[in-house]
Amino acid sequence: MLLKNKIALAFTSDADVIHEVDSLSPLLAISILLNNVQLVLSGVAVVSGSQTKIAYVNLGCYYIIGLHLGFLTGWVLKLGIKGIWCGMILGGTFTQTVTLATITINLTGIKS
């Protein structure tokens, strides 16, 4: 996040591209954070023998929720690439992370 302007400069000197990279960097940071958490949670669930359940969670979160929400926010609401990415992050990745966290808590028997 600290080098967002510098990273774009390594590939282009176009001010519009640099500005777009700057505006999309927070979404990239959120996406990376959630993907790392869901990867660990997915690994825990797979090791515990819940591969089928994880496959359904992945399909449901990304292809049913995330894809449609990305289309809705990107094209229907005309938010462009930010809308597509927000739809995929909030709809797909966030929902998947919360679902996998719930599955992992139930598998481990942690009481809240």
Image (cartoon, grey):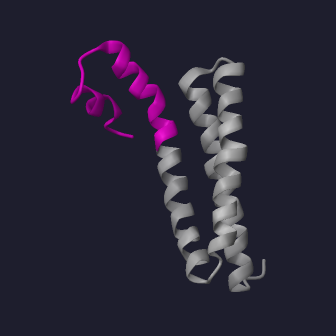
Q: Residue 37: which quarter of the image?
A: bottom right
Q: Is residue 32 above or below residue 73?
A: below
For the point 67% across and 29% down, the residue is: 71
In the displayed image of the protein, which residue is found farthest to the left? 10
Q: Position of residue 108 (x, y in %)?
A: 68, 84
Q: Is residue 24 left or right of residue 87?
A: left
In the displayed image of the protein, which residue is found farthest to the right? 112
In what quadrant of the picture does the N terminus appear?
top left
- Number of callouts: 0
In the displayed image of the protein, which residue is found farthest to the top? 15
Q: Position of residue 94 (x, y in %)?
A: 65, 51
Q: Position of residue 52 (x, y in %)?
A: 66, 71
For the point 49% across and 37% down, the residue is: 26
Any magenta on residue 5?
yes
Q: Is residue 29 above or below residue 19?
A: below
Q: Residue 76: which quarter of the image?
A: top right
In what quadrant of the picture does the C terminus appear?
bottom right
For the point 74% across and 79% down, the residue is: 106
On the question of residue 100 being in view, the answer is: yes
For the point 72% across and 44% down, the residue is: 65
Boundaries of the magenta span: 1-28
Q: Position of residue 22 (x, y in %)?
A: 41, 27
